[in-house]
């Protein structure tokens, strides 16, 4: 898979570069935002199909906190748990938090170089094995996709047709 540049051209045989990775993150976030928008306000924050699961809004808060923590850590070397999305109490708040976190990612992204993505460091949060920063961002992306899939199931259980996953 080669990443397309802004002008539609290909990246001269480069499999993936930081700009291409950001495009993938952007595409996935657009879809997550559309899933948020499909939820009725109350269901977004309260509905869960069984007691052990979380409402979709809580999953989105986790997605946003992970992105903010990882991008800040990779770009600036500042590793700490933030709670940028935890105060969202309405759909409008949650959508604003999505834009705030993504704006911060775009602001810091020029510091996310190929060399920095390939750098391997100890896990700053969970005590897991050392991994590259690219692997951290892939984890964040997989986490978002996983929780968005849960959101699709929730919407279907609520009788709401979710957005088409292949439209970005």
Image (cartoon, rainbow, N blue to C red):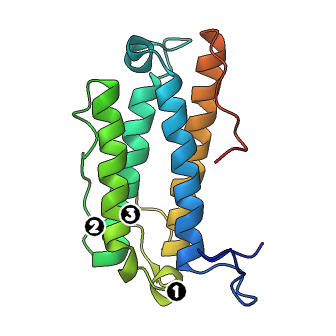
Q: How many marks?
A: 3
Where residue 40 appears, x then y in whole percent?
45, 15
Q: What's the mark number on residue 70? A: 3
Q: Residue at x 32, y 72 (%)?
A: 108
Nearer to us: label 1 or label 3: 1
Q: Quadrant of residue 6?
A: bottom right
Q: Secondary structure at mark 1?
A: helix
Residue named by callout 1? 114
Nearer to us: label 2 or label 3: 3
> Does the residue at mark 2 contact the one at mark 3 (Cβ under 8 Å)?
no
> Hey, which residue is sitting farthest left in the picture?
87
Q: Earlier in the sequence, mark 1 or mark 3?
A: 3
Q: Residue at x 45, y 23 (%)?
A: 54
Where residue 152 appears, x then y in whole percent?
63, 27
Where residue 97 appears, x then y in whole percent?
30, 43
Q: Is residue 63 left or right of residue 154?
A: left
Q: Secondary structure at mark 3?
A: helix
The crowding category of the residue bearing disc 3, from other C-alpha atoms within 10 Å (few below 14, some 14 to 19, many at least 20), is many
Q: Earlier in the sequence, mark 2 or mark 3?
A: 3
Q: CA distance from mark 2 to mark 3?
A: 8 Å
The crowding category of the residue bearing disc 1, from other C-alpha atoms within 10 Å (few below 14, some 14 to 19, many at least 20), is some
Question: Which image quarter is the N terminus in?
Answer: bottom right
Q: Quadrant of residue 67?
A: bottom left
Nearer to us: label 1 or label 2: 1
Residue named by callout 2? 79
């Amino acid at each position: 898979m080669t990443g397309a540049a802004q002008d539609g051209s290909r990246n001269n045989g480069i499999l993936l570069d930081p700009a291409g990775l950001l495009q993938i993150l952007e595409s996935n976030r657009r879809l997550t935002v559309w899933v948020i928008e499909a939820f009725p306000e109350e269901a977004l924050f309260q509905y869960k199909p069984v007691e052990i699961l979380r409402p979709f809004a809580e999953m989105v808060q986790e997605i946003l906190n992970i992105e903010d923590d990882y991008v800040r850590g990779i770009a600036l070397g500042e590793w700490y748990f933030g709670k940028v999305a935890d105060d969202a109490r309405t759909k409008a708040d949650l959508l604003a938090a999505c834009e705030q976190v993504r704006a911060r990612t775009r602001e810091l992204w020029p510091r996310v170089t190929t060399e920095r993505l390939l750098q391997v460091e100890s896990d700053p949060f969970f005590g897991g094995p050392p991994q590259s920063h690219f692997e951290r961002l892939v984890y964040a992306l997989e986490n978002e996709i996983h929780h968005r899939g849960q959101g699709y199931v929730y919407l279907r259980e609520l009788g709401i047709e979710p957005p088409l996953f292949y439209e970005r």
